[in-house]
Amino acid sequence: MKKIKLSIMTLAIALSIGGAFATSPRVTQTCQGATQYYFNGSGYVLAGKMGVDYLCTTSSNICTYYKVGSTYVPCMNGSYCTANCKTDTKPPKTQN
Amino acid sequence: MNKRQVVLESISALLIMLFLYASISKFLDFQRFTGEMNNQPLPKSWTPFLVWTVPSLEIAISVALIFERTRMVGFITSLALMTLFTVYAAAILLHFFAYVPCSCGGVIRKLTWPQHLVFNLFFVGLSVMGIILQRRSSSKSIFITKNSFV
């Protein structure tokens, strides 16, 4: 009985620690580790520090980009926001 | 090992996997976690407290769930924490806050807010089941111990 219990616990601990390391950004090389830029309508500008200089609020837009060579690739989904961030609670009006 | 004990061990294992994975992931990329915490619609002054308390509590719950003697405390704390996360996800979805933060990055973090809510509710259910089964098995073992002395 104790052997089964020990096996279940060992497996759970090993899977969670292994899973955390396997999906860590250092291993998966996610874009969030790179310098973030945002598109201001005319060009790409340094975004700053997430949560401090800007927020990404939920939306289907692209919040930030990161640079691969000379091209800017989408990184974080959402809307780039720096002050008085609000999300619309009402659905957008449709024109008849 | 009877059926109830197997279920109890499996519930503990699932909760350990959830909390240990979540806490280690946070500590492995602490800077990003701090940024994501700042991205939440909570007072920014809470961030230094939350970034240490949440993952530490998750590790403490995992350790408590491993040992038979502390398992009940583990289940109760797990229920409390998961209920708190569920209420927060529900508040986000109900637009209780000024904005809805993005749920970005990671494996669990890739879930949308409605998916987060369902995911949290599942683990709230598991914690409740764990408390019920643990209470039953504890009272049964007390009964056996009492009878063995008679």
Image: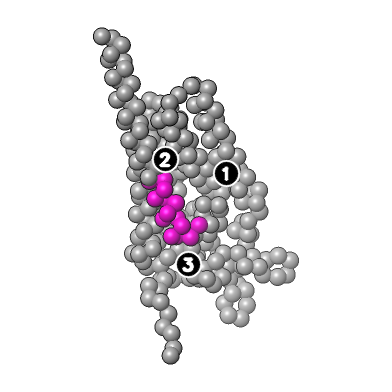
Circle 1 sits in a helix, a strand or a loop, which is it? helix
Please state the chain letter of the residue tagged with numbered disc 3 in the rendered image: A
- The residue most toward the front is B3
Marks 3, 1 in one chain:
yes
Residue at 56 percent across and 64 percent down: it is: A76
Task: Report the residue marked by disc 3.
Answer: A58
Please state the chain letter of the residue tagged with numbered disc 1 in the rendered image: A
Give x and y (percent) for residue B40: 43, 59
Residue at 56 percent across and 49 percent down: it is: B29
Task: Report the residue marked by disc 2.
Answer: B57
- Examine the image and state in which quarter residue B64 appears: top left
A51 in relation to B2, above or below = below
Marks 2, 3 in one chain:
no
Give x and y (percent) for residue B6: 45, 30
The amino acid type, in three-letter code, at marker 1 is Ala
- The residue most toward the top is B150
Q: Give how far apart the Cα atoms at labels 1 and 2 are.
A: 17 Å
Residue A94 visible in the displayed image: yes
Give x and y (percent) for residue B31: 54, 52
- The residue most toward the left is B150
Quadrant (top left, top right, bottom left, bottom right) of the C terminus of chain A: bottom left
The amino acid type, in three-letter code, at marker 2 is Leu
Task: Report the residue marked by disc 1.
Answer: A20
Mark with earlier residue (3, 1): 1
